[in-house]
Image (spheres, rainbow, N blue to C red):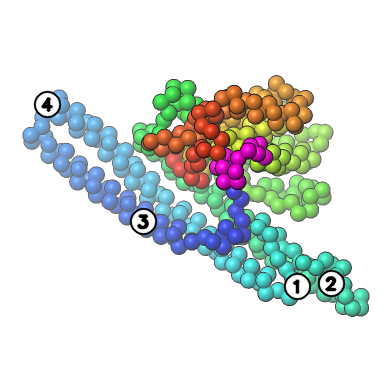
Amino acid sequence: MTDGPSITVTKVLGWNVSAGERLPTELDSLANTIETDVEAASRDVQNSRDYFDGEAGDALRTRFDAERRNALATVDAITSMTAPVREVADIFRSAKTTIVDTVREIEASEYQLFYTEDGQVLSRKSVLEWMTGNLLTGLTQSLSVERTRGALQAALQGALNDIWKADLTYNAELNKVLEGLPEAVREALIPVPSDPELARILREYQVDASDETVVFPSGTLLDTIRLYAPDFQPKAMTQEEAAALAILAAQPPDGPLNLKTFYAIQDEAQVVAETAYPELSETATKVALSDGHADAFRHTYWNARMTQEFGPEWTNTFASAHEKIGSNPAAREAMDLYNNQLGREIGTQNIDATPEELRQKVLDAIHDNRAVVLQSVPDGKQIAFSNSVEPGQTATLPGADLPLGGN
């Protein structure tokens, strides 16, 4: 999975949720239209026996029967998507309402509060600055500020996490529906590169969607993590990701501290990727970070660093589980899995390299045409080797799209 821009307060405030609420009705209408057209064509094809017989006529009717089954399977898939789309739209509507109301409270607060994009709520005055007047009054006021700040932050971050969890959960549900489409339907809708090697990569570097989304960590493990990271917030993820992280947290000698290292590497990869191509403009850098060269760098560097710290086997398990998000477009999934593997190879070959040395090794691999990015082609967007497209001129896929199915 390519981790797109995070869900922020400002982004949610700008959402038009009504578009998602209309989508189930539009899907139902589309399914009815397809089914009506297919059945009308079926009657015409059956009636063709009166004037089109012989081997050619039989071949046409046999081919149509297969196409009719594929079309009706597509109708079933479209119909199956309406319920989860309606449910996630309701969750998004509720979460946005919470965020709107909470932001209004923050802005109206007498405690000079403000919020950050990730949902933190802070006061422009320190605790000591609120401790004015006599000690008892100052202490009472500072405690009131902290209670109000904490409650508003819990509301904001809770709503953002509800959105993130729903996004993962319902993407997984939709992915299972879409992966149930006949292979012929999916392959007809997914552009396949003409280059045989790229076509192989597209087909082979795929994983099936996860059956379940969970929130990790929780319980005693979460309490332990908060001993060294008090503000740490659990996240929604696939059950396979959570299982891999639980194994990591149990590995001696560092145990739960392994997770501290893991999250530090994740942040490090993002920061280094953002500066990997300093010659690009701000706009081109955003393109490069979304299915482009900087995104390829992030996945490759991230896997190389994890391999150094935790070994290639665990890194492969986790990184593949990370791509099990539902409705991950086929080209993006192939790109990410392929670059992940490249990173593990680089990490294994350079196990003692410093982060700076590893950074250069990854850049060299991308410059040597060993990584994969996305490019626009006449019939859509496809994977391409990294030298085929200039950095900052790559294509970007939507957050969710038709999957190809796992291996």
Q: CA distance from mark 4 to mark 1?
A: 85 Å
The image's mark for residue 26 is 3
Disc nearest the viewer among 2 and 3: 2
Q: Which residues are magenta?
A: 275-290
Question: Amino acid under label 1?
Answer: Tyr
How many neighbours does mark 3 have within 10 angstroms: few (below 14), some (14-19), or many (20 or more)? few
Of the two numbered discs 4 and 3 on the same chain, state the one appearing first in sequence: 3
In percent of width and height, residue 147 lies at 77, 69
- Residue 90 visible (yes or no): no
Which corner quadrant holds the N terminus? top right
- Residue hosting label 1: 111
Of the two numbered discs 3 and 1 on the same chain, state the one appearing first in sequence: 3
Q: Residue 279 magenta-drawn?
A: yes
The image's mark for residue 54 is 4
Residue 46 sits above or below residue 368 on the image: below
> Splitting the image into 4 quarters, where does residue 85 fall?
bottom left
Disc nearest the viewer among 4 and 3: 3
